[in-house]
Image: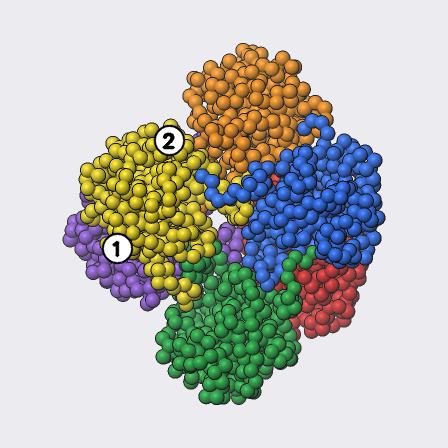
Chain colours: A green, B purple, C orange, D yellow, E red, F blue
Amino acid sequence: MVGVTDLVTFGETMLRLSPPRGDRLETAEAFDVQAGGAESNVAAGAARLGADAVWLSKLPESPLGRRIVGELRSHGVRTGVAWADPDGSRVGTYYLEHGGEPRGTTVVYDRADAAITTVEPDELPTSALESASRFHTTGITPALSERAAETTTALLRAAGEAGVTRSFDLNYRAKLWDPETARDAYEALFEHVDTLFVPRRDAREVLGREGDAVAIANGLAAEFGFETVVVTRGSEGAVALRNGTLTEQEVFDADTFDAIGTGDAFVAGYLAKRIDGGDVAAALEWAAAAAALKRTIAGDVAVITPADVDGVVDGAAGIDR
Amino acid sequence: MVGVTDLVTFGETMLRLSPPRGDRLETAEAFDVQAGGAESNVAAGAARLGADAVWLSKLPESPLGRRIVGELRSHGVRTGVAWADPDGSRVGTYYLEHGGEPRGTTVVYDRADAAITTVEPDELPTSALESASRFHTTGITPALSERAAETTTALLRAAGEAGVTRSFDLNYRAKLWDPETARDAYEALFEHVDTLFVPRRDAREVLGREGDAVAIANGLAAEFGFETVVVTRGSEGAVALRNGTLTEQEVFDADTFDAIGTGDAFVAGYLAKRIDGGDVAAALEWAAAAAALKRTIAGDVAVITPADVDGVVDGAAGIDR
Amino acid sequence: MVGVTDLVTFGETMLRLSPPRGDRLETAEAFDVQAGGAESNVAAGAARLGADAVWLSKLPESPLGRRIVGELRSHGVRTGVAWADPDGSRVGTYYLEHGGEPRGTTVVYDRADAAITTVEPDELPTSALESASRFHTTGITPALSERAAETTTALLRAAGEAGVTRSFDLNYRAKLWDPETARDAYEALFEHVDTLFVPRRDAREVLGREGDAVAIANGLAAEFGFETVVVTRGSEGAVALRNGTLTEQEVFDADTFDAIGTGDAFVAGYLAKRIDGGDVAAALEWAAAAAALKRTIAGDVAVITPADVDGVVDGAAGIDR
Amino acid sequence: MVGVTDLVTFGETMLRLSPPRGDRLETAEAFDVQAGGAESNVAAGAARLGADAVWLSKLPESPLGRRIVGELRSHGVRTGVAWADPDGSRVGTYYLEHGGEPRGTTVVYDRADAAITTVEPDELPTSALESASRFHTTGITPALSERAAETTTALLRAAGEAGVTRSFDLNYRAKLWDPETARDAYEALFEHVDTLFVPRRDAREVLGREGDAVAIANGLAAEFGFETVVVTRGSEGAVALRNGTLTEQEVFDADTFDAIGTGDAFVAGYLAKRIDGGDVAAALEWAAAAAALKRTIAGDVAVITPADVDGVVDGAAGIDR
Amino acid sequence: MVGVTDLVTFGETMLRLSPPRGDRLETAEAFDVQAGGAESNVAAGAARLGADAVWLSKLPESPLGRRIVGELRSHGVRTGVAWADPDGSRVGTYYLEHGGEPRGTTVVYDRADAAITTVEPDELPTSALESASRFHTTGITPALSERAAETTTALLRAAGEAGVTRSFDLNYRAKLWDPETARDAYEALFEHVDTLFVPRRDAREVLGREGDAVAIANGLAAEFGFETVVVTRGSEGAVALRNGTLTEQEVFDADTFDAIGTGDAFVAGYLAKRIDGGDVAAALEWAAAAAALKRTIAGDVAVITPADVDGVVDGAAGIDR
Amino acid sequence: MVGVTDLVTFGETMLRLSPPRGDRLETAEAFDVQAGGAESNVAAGAARLGADAVWLSKLPESPLGRRIVGELRSHGVRTGVAWADPDGSRVGTYYLEHGGEPRGTTVVYDRADAAITTVEPDELPTSALESASRFHTTGITPALSERAAETTTALLRAAGEAGVTRSFDLNYRAKLWDPETARDAYEALFEHVDTLFVPRRDAREVLGREGDAVAIANGLAAEFGFETVVVTRGSEGAVALRNGTLTEQEVFDADTFDAIGTGDAFVAGYLAKRIDGGDVAAALEWAAAAAALKRTIAGDVAVITPADVDGVVDGAAGIDR
């Protein structure tokens, strides 16, 4: 509760509404409700893994806005929310239908005009940002509105000026914008980013990169001057390039119960370990373990502990009794 | 399936998301899901009571849009929906938290920019309207957008030209507009209305009427030339004025499980009985019985049968075994 | 587990399928499942209140048959079941929809041709009957089939020959037979009955009795030679006439959660107290208390303890912590 | 809603009562409820895939009968039901317990004497049949009662006279009759059938056919003069023989959540594509895709859309966001 | 998050396990889970009403301990927990069965040897206490163990030395100790208490006071020197005596859904209003309103907002839409 | 109900509290509740498979104690319980969180000071023991308390004196004691044991045995004089050594839904078949089949029938309809 904040994240959190397994959005009689959003998922995961994390956002001052804050607080996240008038603002929602081969997982976004689309830097408690070790946001936020994009830039810039290490997860969402627009926006932000997380597929299809993950990492680092580039390759694991040094990490096998939030858990594990003083190799290992654990857990958030992550890294499982 | 349609209604239907009794929107882990909207509630109720009913609206061609249609169809309603591109449109939603004295029932609307706000007459299968006996809409629809208001007017006018009896339920919603704006809009529509349903409270507070229900009915009929005016008075029952003849109806006592949709059940009962050839007294009795039954049933729709309504009118209850 | 059995009951037990409160059979997505049947309700209630009770019946040797047995055993009832070939027999079911004023409670029986309709005395472990203190059955059983009626007569006769006190609850079910047929059947059985439980309404409408409960009790005792007649009067309480002595009992106020099984809980309380050595006044008091408790509990069975009943009789309630 | 009907099906629909996964019928506290029946499953699947489908059957005019109709209507099926007096008729039910290796899936039928066993052609709105493109029924219906078998024959004959293409799915149910009786009944119907769907196993064990699927198809077509024979081979896919031309189709891999209704989804996909003008190869592909999708969805009905089926055929899956 | 803490509370929080309404502990298949404890209920209620509240306690470092902390944090409470080794410590639990007249509400405590029974002042972050405006604990804590009683005394003394206003809710629990032992313990603590909350019944039966609430308040204030005494009288409302001035407050009518936590909501409302600068009359009004609202909400915690409380005080209810 | 008891078991049964799949103990809103304990699992499994089984234990006379008894009775187990005063005793509980690779299954025991820790032989109805064919207990019971260990010894001794065949399942629980203490306790009991069930891993890590399963079985039989030793090897199956004769048994493949209780189902299958007159090979086959079935079923108890087991042995599965 005292001292410098470890991690500040900024972004939208939505209500996630999800029917039971095997049921479809068209016919289910009840939806499970949870808070979900890339940047709050990272904050919650990192807080659960030991970081003192703050999440910044904008929400209507309504029961729905408050439930998002309450849920994040339950994971130990401190929240810095700009409260909007509930009469003229809304909470973004997304409907998630779990799939199963050959039926894909369906996501129906209903997030247009959410409160965060009007967020301005002055509304946010940016003092937390200035005393933080790390700042994290993703490529979803600038896609939400021009205002959100400007505020993202402003926060990244302010963080940089305060000497905060800034990380950015590309998180390309085809339902929000097209690849060209996204690429322009991303590249405009890259000058303010120290650590980039990017899926190999998005590097190729959105950023127009070629070659394998190592080539992508080297190219991006060379062109934009990132201190660290982490390229994820789905089931083939991840590669990190930091100051010219390459580190590879395999995935841990997982029984997937809910794949949503896996990437955010990966980032949370990485950042939490780095904050805790771990090197890149250790951080990647925690990232992979946190991601594997997340897959076994319902909801956007990796409801895990450091002991859980250590258990995966150490290879322990089974029934402990 | 043959011949002339009994009833056409037009309006918005939303997803209704509702936590279990005793739980609050802020903390509940699951929401029950249902379709709810004044005009579809009336169509469903009337269809269940024997009318051949068609509901006109606009929805995104998404799982959420389809579930609204499916649910209405299950009650026997035929649906005439203008399907909007799901990428640029949304389903309105509302969050309903059941109260209990002294905690009020909470409704959080998230209906701005729903697909229906862009509805135009040409998109709708208005041929059904032209061959119908009755057309019904409510004061919610013109509050949704200018376009929705224009389309409401156009449909009422077209119905009038086709000789269809037009009914209108005032349904003032303070969360959608202020009383003055609403009054202007209502009064502009009244020339196209044959039967007006209006709560005494709204007659006073929105339409600026004075006096008791009878005075209100007489005044409205005189000023706007309604064939029939039905004034509801909450627990004090209803009064109908038709061509100068007054009819009164008491409420039936009810254990209220879910009060939402009570007014729509009232209208459904009234219209179904009128369509079936009943006079105003019989229709009011069915209206009151349908409303009382609705209170005992979860959801917006009065899931009832003619036998249920007759049972209430006849005073039968208890366990039948 | 040793010695003489306190109570043997005989009759049909069905699967009870029931939607959540506020939902209708037409639309509910799930039904709660329970075993329910007048005579097993009495056995379970009495067993829970201290009696060593055995229930006799016939069921298919199927998962559904076994679940009825398992559920009754969980209340401490011993079961003497004639197992029918599952391929040619069925479990009776009933669908229960809880009402709420002015909507009545709906019971849909689907019990035709249940296994018990073919039950014969030789299939049943009637040795338990011969060593019992009391035998109880109801007017439902003879309504199920001719065979069931004959077996009811045979068991009552055998019990009488063995000196067992026989009680009979009229339990008229209008969905099973008409009053005239029922009256003839009842009256043919009355010579084998020592204790009659009869609702005042059924005494009037089915047995053709006139006057108040006392007159009814006297008339029935005089005409058929019952040792004891208990006439229940709904919310007005009950009257017992035993060997010319009248006892009256008021009802205990109850918040009704589930009214089904109230009458059976009444009988269970009465018999359990009599078996325990209580006099008629004490038995009636237990009967009324068990009935009131049942109303607060979901399901057919009064899931209660002697302490619960004593608590009601002593007037204790509130939160004990 | 206008013009000629695409598809008419005829058969029994039951209430399906099913405990949660991992629970047994013996001990589960609640059952999920759904409508299920081979012919209505086909109608619902085909309606969802674009066909204008009508389902003919007989049901009691009870809440349970109405819920079956309501559920089918929600999928867009039009229903032509002969309503039976609820006092003397019943809805068939079946209890479904999902298994898991090595525990098989348990189906307990309780369908004897269901209303459909008394169905006669005159009770049904057969005008829909006469103006239809296709008529479909299965080998379950003639197994239900002599009357149902006669009505099946009558409808097939009437369809043939009206020039409607008639399909028949063998659907042998060992719990309803023995192979010899079934074979006689099937073969008596085959003269009225244009398209036969038959599992290879049933062709061998019930129809006494030998050889592989192609040999079976050729043999059946030669002997009974079918225009089309579709032989399904479980995980080995299907073979269609139409006018001497063979088409093969592999299965699509599927994570099976609920296998019930897979065969009906196959038929629905096939018929919907044929109705839409597709050739046999395209229809088989839709059939296989619809069947694979069904496996991922709870309930008897394939709650799918044409886009879902196209997605499987095109090999798209994953999370779309 | 900055500056002086408004309120510090100290006490045990348990897991509350509760079957659905109408079900009994003996037979329910699932229990709802919540955190519940008098002092954390007060902290959560006060935090929700605007106070910066800290709760001090001791818990095992287990998933169960963490869930209590997470749940309290979700209401905005900051937690200062002494974490015990999970191998040698446990979380207290209580089983709650909701009653209904004439069946009382059943509470089964399983709280012996909970971690808090070993709590010592040095384990707790008492710095929060020293900078707080108010400290609150209840008569439950000293009943848990000698060590807990000593720590209660130590914290009250430390608070007094730091000039913190100390409040104490008698909360007599007959299942934890007898009245004589409790009275001795209470009276030993009273010298450290500024504000006493006491039910009239406990004042009489445990503290041996006589007379009406006013007499009790005067007597206690005179004997023990309390600055404020609040005597609650169940449905008859409350009386506060502060520095010789009497204030009375009626109860607000409430539909009781869950009575547990009503008294804690009362204290939370009182303290929150006092912290906010309100006088005793305003605080009592908030107390009564918070208590009435709590009764409508499932769980121990009053999940309410200042607007909810103001709404009750202002008499607003109904459906707001 | 007549004659000699087949099987008596003795041990603790706890309440098992378990969140839904994919949820964690920290965040789940509801827990499923079941009775679970090694020895009652064996009794229930054996009773379901045809044995007349009695379970001996000690429980508080509370709703929680009664629900354990009721649940076991529902499986046909007769219960011989020493009832403890509920005010000074408790039911042991355990919290079970289902895992999924790489997250292990979590068991949180809260069983210290459960009522059984004070159990004495004189409290138990040991007459059942003396007339039994077999007595079974496990290595959990002596770990609970010194008193429980003494009573275990006393019962084993009494059984031996009465000529009852005594079996013992090692069931080492690392959360209850360390391997050395456990080994000493086990070895002191071995003189009273005829049939030992031991996992190969425990034989090695706790009993200090070396070599493969056969070597372990031979060594244990030689050293302690067991008539029969059954060594289980997880997925590699089991080996039994009886009077010098070796029998091997493979596992049956299983889709694991709930692994808890697998070992108890194995023992139940073995003992039920032996009681039924089967030889060791037949008993091992039943054991393996019962264990595989258990894995597919929620809860501690193998809710199975002899027909289920025979079906696995015979290799039948699929959908039977």
| Whether label 2 touches label 1, CB < 8 Å | no
Disc 2 from disc 1: Cα separation = 36 Å
Residue for point 75% across, 39% down: F135
Tell me: A62 left or right of F299: left
* Other residues around mark 1 within 10 Å, as few (<14) / some (14–19) / many (≥20): some
The label on residue D278 is 1
Chain of the residue under label 2: D
Placement of C240 over or under F11, stated as above or below: above
Picture residue at 43% right of the left edge, 22% below the top: C177
x and y, in percent, of residue D181 in the image: 37, 31
Quadrant holding the N terminus of chain F: top right
Q: Nearer the viewer, residue F5 or E186?
A: F5
Judged left or right of residue B161, residue F171 is right
Give the quadrant of the C terminus of chain F.
top left
Amino acid found under the numbered disc labelled 2: Thr
Q: Tag 1, which secondary structure? A: loop
Tell me the residue at 53%/48% (across/down). D101
Which quadrant of the view contains residue C161? top right
Q: Quadrant of residue A7?
A: bottom right
Which residue position holds label 2? Answer: D181
- Chain on which label 1 sits: D
Residue A39 coordinates in the image, percent (x, y)? 51, 73
Q: Nearer the viewer, residue E134 or F107?
A: F107
- Specify the amino acid type for callout 1: Gly
Between circles 2 and 1, the one closer to the viewer is 2
Work out whether disc 2 and disc 1 sit on a shared chain: yes
- Closer to the chain start, of discs 2 and 1, is 2
Whether residue D236 can be seen here: yes
